[in-house]
Image: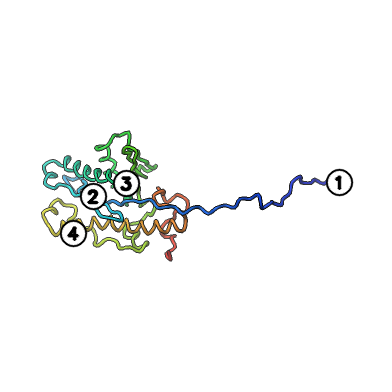
Amino acid sequence: MIFRNKRSYSTKVETKFITPLKSPKPLKPNSFLTMDIETMNLNGNQIPVLITTHDLNETKTFIIDHELLILDSDKAIFNLWKDYFNYLNQLSIKYIFVHNLGKFDGIFIYKNLFKHYNINYIKPIIDQHNSFVCISIKIGNFEIRFLDSMRIFPCSLNELCKTFGVEGKFNSYKSEYNEISLFNNKDLLNEWIRYARQDSISLCNALLNAQKIYLEKYNIDLTSIVSRAMPLVYHLKYLDKTF
């Protein structure tokens, strides 16, 4: 006698009991700033002397008191960052992209946050190579996060601008920008300030275009990304240039 096993259930699914998956609601993009730090040589050390930042509404420039810099460099640098942080405290924007946070710029930001805020409110995320992934500072009930755009798009600023179809740098970096004597040359000083401001502007414009693409195609907000290793975040060479 042959016994045949019979299923006690049906493989037919009653569709009336299935709830169709809903398409995710389109995200409302978070606002962000971009920032750039320019440095100069002082007694063999690179020190921050100019900070620029940009969003949809305006470009702000914070420049060091170069006369005080000669007399008391520590105080001059402290005042520069104080002005910048006071400006951030007045805003409601909590995300700031820097195109080199991992190393050079992140060191300056982190070091000077410690001089102006309680250490308990500063939270860095550092990878296995001792590079900054992001830096957070909590001010009351508000948190500001510094993010590295180079971690998402690992290329030069000019390449990033070219990929997303925006204007890049006006001119190449000049060695004269690294000398304090620049403050005594009005034309060169103005050129240097324009150069620095354009870095923040072009980065912001490129990221705004990228933000639009990522929202439309993947429903992902750039401010939620901290590394290109996250899902759906690709190296630039794999981006569809027809966007």
Tell me the kind of residue under disc 1: Ile
> Picture quarter containing residue 160?
bottom left
- According to the picture, the residue beneath numbered tag 3 turns out to be 92
Residue 165 image point, x, y percent: 35, 64
Q: Few, some or many C-alpha atoms within 10 Å of disc 1 (few <14, some 14-19, many ≥20)?
A: few
Element assignment for label 3: loop
Tell me the kind of residue under disc 4: Glu
Q: Residue at x 32, y 36 (%)?
A: 121
**Mark 2 or mark 1, which is nearer to you?**
2
Q: Residue at x 13, y 41 (%)?
A: 72
Q: CA distance from mark 1 to mark 3?
A: 76 Å
The tag earlier along the polypeptide, 1 or 3, is 1
- According to the picture, the residue beneath numbered tag 2 turns out to be 51
Kindly indicate whether the residue at mark 4 contacts the one at mark 2 (C-beta within 8 angstroms).
no
Q: Nearest the camera: 86 or 71?
A: 86
The tag earlier along the polypeptide, 4 or 3, is 3
- According to the picture, the residue beneath numbered tag 4 turns out to be 191
> Picture quarter containing residue 204?
bottom left
Kindly indicate whether the residue at mark 3 contacts the one at mark 4 (C-beta within 8 angstroms).
no
Q: Residue at x 37, y 54 (%)?
A: 154
Element assignment for label 2: strand
- According to the picture, the residue beneath numbered tag 1 turns out to be 2
